[in-house]
Image (spheres, rainbow, N blue to C red):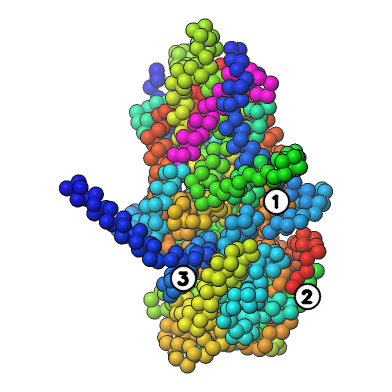
């Protein structure tokens, strides 16, 4: 399943080749993660020292906390809406770039730039642009005072981080969509055009169905990414507020653990998040596997 | 030519080696501070002054990018045995450090390393905030401030008043008049609990938590849903809804200080440490002053609380590092240095002798520093009582953020004052109980 | 295309232009804000045209944050991560795909799972490991009882030396290499390589190392470029980890770390010096942007060819 028909059988060499990666992963991932797992069943004092075994107490505290479920709900909304937004925009842009009208290379070239921008930089830029008292969007408030205020209005704040997140993911989606479209044989669309089907017809009938694998692959990547890698954006734009409106799961883990110094509670939450992401990835993995068999 | 250059290089090398041998290497120790920006530069400057004042020791000073980061990083570093010798920890982190078993308590340290310190030099309100329940100092108070009201004199003049409001009732009438005079923001506030909850409760002599605000044990419970605080929060909400007061935070684009300094809002409660900031960055011609925080009618004013940070000496360092640290702490506490700080920041002099000297030298008469003495009056208004000594609650930073979130919810209209504050108390008590459970077997000194 | 569709063509350009504006406006605003003085940048509504303070602001931001040495550090770290990741990913994926042994599925999954728990949520224990990298092995030795065995037999305490990675390039680089991205990408690439190549190589009597070096590596060039770009951007943009493990900022501070120093500190009511903050932001985002722009062609091809 994971390998080739033709393989080598030098086991020592194979072990040697994979050893550096395994050592790194063990040292910097499994050991710390294992420690976190242990903490999730104990009460770990911030400065170290003796900890107490408390069984499932931390998990109970987490699951009985309405604010935790609030955080889960926001994370799901955030992940779904930024995925829809980022993929929707990327798909439209890719489809139209793929028409290859004059100048399309320039668009393709520049659509890609946001990929390079660091999350804290995105956060900082969006915080400035969408600040209600200064920056770009504040002009809205001059026309309708109080219409836009992510610092006061939770919905506005969620919109803000969703936009920032979607913005930074469009580029990645765009590449994959465009590549998917370009792999569709020209002859296929041209033949359809000869038969008299219009541009939009062809998009609906030929291009979209053939894009389906790319589409599903991206859905999972986008969702996972929104769940797991949104820390930088939230930290600089809203810091989880107002009134916990943007307290995403990954941010809550960080603020409970590192800021609140309750390592055990944070560890329990990371375990839950990890299980969630693993199940998402599992779906993706099965899917990617199938696609490999196709090619 | 090439030969020439080579010999010059050799000479230079020999010279540097010679110089290095002539000078005994300085004993280095690490000092982490939390302040950032302009104040962070002052911290770095303070280290430089120490390093230039003598040749035996060298303070290696590292800004951690924020008070909370300084605390978090110190904890992580201590676990990894890579911690600094001295660390600047903000007021709210005091309990965590007292219970940590990771520090060298200040009284013992001063004795062991023969420091010249006289603990009675500190202002009583500063001492009580950082002392144990038995009155022992475990850390060295450092940059200190208290909260005051900043008010725009020119705006108040427009409504025919020359005096700042002394009571909240008067303040409300003034705000109404300001609004009637066309001012859209008479008062700027944010969700920082330090001014509105902690300072306000202290000057009204009201408890924030049971067990003497937590000094008497880890089983304290928050009581901010009773007494003066709910009344004040309800007022804030009312004033906000009437268009008298406005929320200003970094996320809205301008903090209260910025909104006050550029003239958008006519008043605010803030740390005296911002006195210099307002002076430096205020709109040209801004006519402003500071006053003590108003008191509700029917209450007697008590002393306000100190805010800022203290210096903790961490455990498990070498004798040499401790000697260097002791020299640094002694240096920082010399009257000259204590007096230097208020000159370059808005912080107050932390010792009585330094304050008296400054007053006699006419420091507070200088136009730039005029009004700074208000915070000293406020801080020393009465001797500290059980409710005004300080706050000693486990994981107080988390409690602050719980209260803050509920305040946000109340001001946004998602919750009533009663529900919001009850929720804040319930959640804070959970934090306190978890803290108590985590530190089972250790007692608060 | 075959037919003439003038209206649709106009629409296409409109849409593409809108997309361009949406994606580039944030960058433009950052740029504009970085060219004005304090007062202009804080006026509402904000002007959308650059001002004349560019040089002043950039000089100030550059000097204030000491970007010279910081950028150099960022480069060292980014290149270290890129090179290390490519090397390790290429060989570990090779082991998984081209060798047949019992644990390869397990190993693959072990590596793969690391994608799922970001550094932010396990930062404290990871920091503790970085402070003494050999501690896990020491504890393992203690755990399996080897330490006490040696102690009773030889009478010496088996103690591994302490090795701290705080304040070092290795500390900034190695934990970032310990992720699965590259291995996964390389694995996908190897799976697309036709089996005939390996067969032919075997028939020619080439060993696994020869085959890897002479055949696979040259084939994986675009893949390498793609992975290189991803890793460069990823490493350059690291924020929380360097912030934690670097206390010796003068020597090991990176450029992105400096971002949090130029954000005006809200606690102390500093003025919103957005113009300086934006100048710094723009300077920090430029190097990865340039890398992406220059590598774009190979990058896109590499990513996409492995995915199919």
Would residue C117 appear left or right of B278 to someone viewing this image?
right
Choose between C110 and A210: the one closer to the eye: C110
Q: Residue furthest top?
A: C203
Residue appearing at x 56%, y 87% in the figure: B352
Of all residues, the one furthest to the left in this rendering is B1
Q: Secondary structure at mark 3?
A: loop
CB contact under 8 Å: marks 1 and 2: no
Q: Nearer the viewer, mark 1 or mark 2?
A: 2
Give x and y (percent) for residue B324. Answer: 53, 70
The quadrant of the image that shows the N terminus of chain A is top right
Q: Is residue A98 above or below residue C270?
A: above
Give the chain letter at badge 2.
Answer: B
Q: Tell me where the magenta segment starts and ends, as one range.
A: C78-104
Q: Are marks 2 and 3 in contact (CB under 8 Å)?
A: no
The Cα–Cα distance between marks 2 and 3, rounded to whole angstroms, is 42 Å
Q: What is the distance, in whole Å, between disc 1 and disc 3 at their CAs?
A: 44 Å
Numbered circle sitting on residue C157: none
**Residue on which the image places disc 2:** B216
Give the labeled residue for mark 3. Answer: B56
Instruction: Identify which residue, B200 or B399, lies in the foreground.
Output: B399
Label 2 Cα crowd, 10 Å radius (few <14 / some 14-19 / many 20+): some
> Label 3: chain?
B
Crowding at label 1, few (<14), some or many (≥20) Cα neighbours within 10 Å?
Answer: many
């Amino acid at each position: 399943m994971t390998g080739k028909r033709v393989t080598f059988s030098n086991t020592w060499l194979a072990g040697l080749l994979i050893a550096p990666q395994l050592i790194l992963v063990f040292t910097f991932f499994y050991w710390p993660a294992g420690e976190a797992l242990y903490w999730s069943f104990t009460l770990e004092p911030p400065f170290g020292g003796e900890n107490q075994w408390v069984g499932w107490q931390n998990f109970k505290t987490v699951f009985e906390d309405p604010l935790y479920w609030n955080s889960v709900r926001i994370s799901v909304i955030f992940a779904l809406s930024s995925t829809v937004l980022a993929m929707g925009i990327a798909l439209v842009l890719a489809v139209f770039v793929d028409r290859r009208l004059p100048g399309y290379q320039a668009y393709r070239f520049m659509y890609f730039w946001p990929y390079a921008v660091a999350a804290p930089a995105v956060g900082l830029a969006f915080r400035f642009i969408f600040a209600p008292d200064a920056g770009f969007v504040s002009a809205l408030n001059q026309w309708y005072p109080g219409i836009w205020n992510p610092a006061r209005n939770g919905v506005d704040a969620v919109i803000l981080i969703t936009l920032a997140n979607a913005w930074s993911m469009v580029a990645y989606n765009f590449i994959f969509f465009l590549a998917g479209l370009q792999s569709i044989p020209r002859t296929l669309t041209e033949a359809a055009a000869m038969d008299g089907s219009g541009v939009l017809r062809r998009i609906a009938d030929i291009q979209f169905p053939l894009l389906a694998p790319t589409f599903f692959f991206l859905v999972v990547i986008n969702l996972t990414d929104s769940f797991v890698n949104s820390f930088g954006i939230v930290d600089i734009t809203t810091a989880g507020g107002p009134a916990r409106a943007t307290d995403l799961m990954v941010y809550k883990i960080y603020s409970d653990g590192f800021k609140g110094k309750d390592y055990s509670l944070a560890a329990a939450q990371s375990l839950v998040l990890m299980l969630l992401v693993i199940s998402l990835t599992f779906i993706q993995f099965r899917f990617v596997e199938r696609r490999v068999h196709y090619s | 030519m090439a030969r020439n250059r080579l010999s010059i290089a050799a000479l230079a090398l020999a010279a540097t080696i010679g110089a290095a041998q002539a000078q005994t290497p300085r004993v280095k120790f690490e000092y982490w501070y939390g302040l950032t920006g302009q104040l962070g530069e002052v911290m770095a400057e303070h280290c430089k002054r120490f390093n230039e004042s003598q040749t035996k020791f060298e303070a290696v000073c590292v800004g951690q990018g924020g008070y909370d980061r300084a605390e978090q990083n110190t904890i992580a570093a201590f676990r990894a045995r890579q911690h600094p010798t001295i660390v600047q920890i903000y007021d709210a982190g005091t309990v965590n450090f007292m219970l940590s078993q990771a520090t060298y308590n200040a009284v013992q340290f001063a004795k062991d390393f023969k420091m010249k310190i006289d603990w009675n030099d500190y202002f009583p309100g500063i001492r009580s905030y950082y002392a144990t329940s038995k009155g022992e100092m475990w850390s060295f108070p450092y940059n200190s401030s208290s909260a005051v009201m900043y008010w725009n004199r020119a705006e108040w003049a427009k409504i025919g008043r020359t005096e700042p409001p002394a009571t909240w009732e008067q303040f409300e009438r003034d705000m109404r008049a300001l609004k009637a005079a066309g001012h859209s923001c008479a008062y700027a506030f944010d969700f920082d609990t330090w001014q509105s909850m902690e300072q306000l409760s202290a000057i009204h002599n009201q408890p924030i938590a049971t067990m003497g605000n937590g000094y008497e044990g880890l089983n304290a419970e928050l009581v901010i849903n009773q007494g003066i605080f709910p009344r004040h929060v309800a007022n804030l909400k009312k004033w906000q809804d009437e268009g008298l007061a406005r929320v200003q935070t970094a996320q809205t684009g301008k903090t209260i200080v910025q909104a006050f300094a550029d003239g958008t809002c006519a008043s605010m409660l803030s740390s005296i440490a911002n006195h210099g900031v307002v002076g430096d960055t205020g709109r040209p011609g801004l006519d402003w002053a500071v006053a003590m925080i108003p008191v509700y009618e029917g209450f007697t004013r008590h002393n306000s609380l100190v805010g800022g940070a203290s210096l903790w000496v961490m455990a498990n360092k070498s004798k040499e590092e401790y000697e260097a640290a002791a020299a640094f702490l002694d240096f920082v506490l010399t009257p000259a240095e204590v007096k230097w700080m208020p000159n370059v920041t808005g912080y107050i002099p932390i010792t009585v002798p330094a304050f008296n000297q400054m007053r006699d030298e006419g420091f507070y008469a200088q136009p730039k520093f005029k009004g700074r003495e208000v915070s000293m009056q406020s801080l020393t208004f009465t001797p500290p009582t059980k409710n005004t000594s300080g706050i000693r609650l486990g994981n107080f930073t988390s409690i602050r953020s719980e209260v803050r979130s509920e305040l946000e919810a109340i001001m946004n209209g998602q919750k009533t004052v009663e529900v919001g504050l009850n929720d804040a108390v319930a959640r804070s008590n959970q934090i306190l109980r978890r803290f108590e459970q985590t530190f089972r077997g250790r007692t608060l000194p | 295309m075959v037919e003439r569709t003038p209206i649709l063509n106009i629409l296409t350009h409109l849409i593409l232009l809108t997309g361009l504006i949406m994606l580039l406006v944030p960058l433009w605003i950052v740029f504009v804000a970085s060219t004005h003085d304090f007062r202009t940048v804080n006026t509402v509504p904000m002007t959308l045209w650059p001002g004349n303070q560019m040089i002043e602001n950039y000089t100030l931001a550059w000097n204030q944050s000491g970007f010279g040495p910081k950028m150099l550090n960022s480069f060292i770290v980014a290149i270290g991560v890129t090179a290390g990741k490519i090397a390790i990913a290429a060989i570990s994926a090779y082991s998984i795909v081209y060798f047949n042994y019992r644990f390869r599925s397990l190993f693959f999954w072990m590596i793969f799972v690391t994608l799922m728990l970001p550094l932010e949520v396990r930062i404290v224990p990871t920091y503790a490991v970085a402070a003494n990298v050999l501690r896990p092995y020491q504890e393992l030795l203690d755990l399996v009882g080897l330490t006490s065995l040696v102690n009773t037999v030889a009478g010496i305490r088996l103690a591994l030396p302490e090795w701290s990675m705080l304040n070092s390039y290795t500390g900034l680089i190695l934990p970032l290499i310990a992720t699965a991205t590259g291995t996964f990408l390389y694995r996908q690439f190897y799976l697309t390589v036709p089996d005939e190549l390996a067969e032919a190589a075997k028939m020619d009597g080439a060993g696994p190392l020869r085959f890897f070096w002479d055949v696979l590596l040259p084939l994986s060039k675009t893949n390498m470029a793609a992975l290189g770009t991803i890793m460069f951007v990823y490493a350059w943009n690291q924020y929380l980890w360097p912030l934690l493990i670097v206390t010796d900022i003068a020597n090991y501070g990176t450029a992105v770390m400096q971002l949090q120093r130029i954000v005006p500190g809200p606690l102390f009511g500093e003025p919103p010096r957005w113009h300086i903050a934006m100048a710094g932001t723009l300077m920090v985002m430029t190097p990865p942007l340039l890398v992406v722009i220059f590598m774009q062609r190979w990058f896109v091809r590499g990513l996409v060819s492995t995915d199919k």
